[in-house]
Image (cartoon, rainbow, N blue to C red):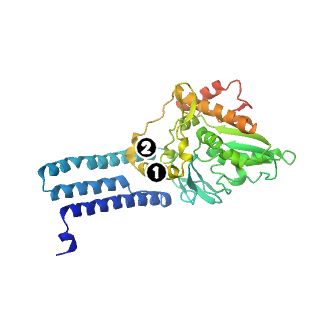
Amino acid sequence: MGVYSRLSVRVRALLWALVWVLGSLAALKLDSVLKGRAGFGIMPFVVIGIGALGLLIYLAIASKHKALKLALSYLTILPLCLIIGELYAHYKLESSSEQDSCAASTSGTYASDYFTPSPITGYKGKPNTTATAHKSTQSGKSLYNVSYTTDELGWRITPSSKLDSSSCVLFFGDSFTIGEGVQDNETLPFYFGRALGKQANARIYNFGFHGYGPHQALALVQSGEIARIVKDCQSVLAIYESLPGHIARAGGFSPWEQGTNAPRFYLDPSGSLKWGNAYLHKSPVLAKLAPKLKARLAQSYLYKLLQPSYGYDESYNALYFAIIDTLQKQLQEQFGAHFTLVLWDATDLSDEIERKESHAIIKHYKNGLGGGLWI
């Protein structure tokens, strides 16, 4: 008789449970690697559900107690629900993605070797990296083919920046700010630096990043990260670039932030702005564990489908305004910075929500904001 056949039922059950756990971890890892390098996944929670279903059936058959056998049989409903739910969610999400006429795919090291976790902003660029990004439509038409070069801290370089200047310009914002789809010498911060000319040169910092919102900008300032970087600046101009959709981003509705430690702000009953998960950037252990756990959960299609969807609400507007106002105040207190909000307002192609958001921002700041509001 073999070694396995001589093992007791309990030991066999523990052995198969261990195999299921290890197999589940392997499925999650494989899915993550494939999505990062090949652009597709394996639906790991379906694999986990099938493994759990098989384990419960084995335990039910092997059990000699009728009550336990019955209980295990009923428990098979849970993995069955998980499998069905994952398949349904995958179908729904993929269907809506295929109906998106603007859907595109990105290849290059941008997808696999560019992003890195951050305990302050949730994610950012890897330091000292040149990442390639080739974006094309579903029909294969090339939209752009560029490279993103980061400095020793992971922020995109600005070739027009004068590193020996004590006058500093800080840019905050999203993909428009970092320069999605353009080269290092084609970004908004680059052209700003070049427009200053030789007589008014400045050291320029691009703290924008793909998918960022005002919550990342405020977290960078409140955490002391900006002060650490620009400690030698004697005069500071700060510019925040915003889309109307940054209201939703400030409220935590960005699907790409699932599985990250993106900062979460909220207004308490008194109306004061609080950084709800600020403890994450102060605890090295939590800063490492939390994003890993969130990232694994974010691999579930059912989890993604069940996430609350964004709808226009004035309470979200209030949170956005509080973050922008606090950002301006913090920049003024820490650096004596002149602050300007640049808004890319709604267009004729905007949907109803974006038009409402744009109107709300313009109305709220109709008398200007510190240094001004550019539209």
State whether residue 262 appears in this view. no
Residue 29 shown left or right of residue 232 in the figure: left
Residue 96 is marked as 2
Q: Please state which amino acid type lies under the numbered disc 1.
A: Ala
Camera-near label (1 vs 2) is: 1
In the image, residue 24 lies at what x, y percent? Answer: 35, 58
Q: Quadrant of the C terminus?
A: top right
Disc tally is 2
- Residue closer to the observer: 82 or 152: 152
State whether residue 220 appears in this view. yes
| Location of residue 348 with respect to 232 vertically, above or below | above
**Inter-mark Cα distance, 1 to 2:** 22 Å
- Residue closer to the observer: 270 or 138: 270
Residue at 46% in and 60% down: 33
Q: Please state which amino acid type lies under the numbered disc 2.
A: Ser
In the image, residue 211 lies at what x, y percent? Answer: 57, 45
In the image, residue 162 lies at what x, y percent? Answer: 80, 51
Give the mark nearest the N terminus, 1 or 2: 2
Q: Check if mark 1's residue and mark 2's residue have beta carbons within 8 Å.
A: no
Residue 212 is marked as none
- Residue closer to the observer: 31 or 265: 265
Residue at 46% in and 57% down: 35
Callout 1: few (<14), some (14-19), or many (20+) C-alpha neighbours within 10 Å?
some
Disc 1 marks which residue?
295
In the image, residue 99 lies at what x, y percent? Answer: 45, 44
